[in-house]
Image (cartoon, rainbow, N blue to C red):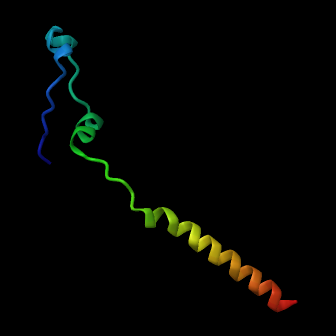
């Protein structure tokens, strides 16, 4: 895996070398990965499946009575 270098903020540039913190894995991932919005279909799909399951249960109860 290739290493990604992240420049420290300017406020850290004034600190002595020992006080600077090496970038952690999470910092590197956060700097590289862009968060994309979730498609609306994926948000609505579980609700639709749940409604269909409840409707199926209601039909099953009505048929058995």
Give the residue drawn at x 73%, y 80%: 57
Residue closest to the far right: 65
Residue at the outermost front position = 40
Q: Position of residue 30 (x, y in %)?
A: 28, 39
Could you say where residue 3 lies in the image, as x and y percent from the top left? Answer: 13, 40
Give the answer, above or below, for where 5 lies relative to 40: above
Residue located at (16% from left, 17% from top): 10
Task: Name the quarter where the C terminus is drawn.
Answer: bottom right
Is 63 rendered above or below residue 15?
Answer: below
User: Between residues 41 and 10, which one lies in front from this camera angle?
Assistant: 41
Q: Is residue 18 left or right of residue 54?
A: left
Considering only vertical position in the picture, is 21 above or below 17?
below
Residue sitting at x 13%, y 39%: 4
Of 27 and 39, the residue lying toward us: 39
Q: Position of residue 52 (x, y in %)?
A: 63, 77
**Residue at the location (18% across, 12% down)?**
18
Percent of width and height locating residue 29: 25, 41
Q: Is residue 62 toward the left or the right of residue 56 in the image?
A: right
Answer left or right for 39 relative to 4.
right
Give the mark count.
Answer: 0
């Amino acid at each position: 895996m290739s290493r990604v270098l992240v420049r420290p903020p300017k406020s850290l540039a004034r600190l002595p070398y020992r006080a600077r913190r090496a970038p952690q894995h999470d910092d590197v991932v956060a700097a590289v990965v862009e968060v994309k919005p979730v498609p609306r279909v994926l948000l609505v799909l579980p609700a639709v499946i749940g409604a269909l399951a409840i409707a199926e249960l209601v039909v099953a109860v009505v048929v058995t009575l």
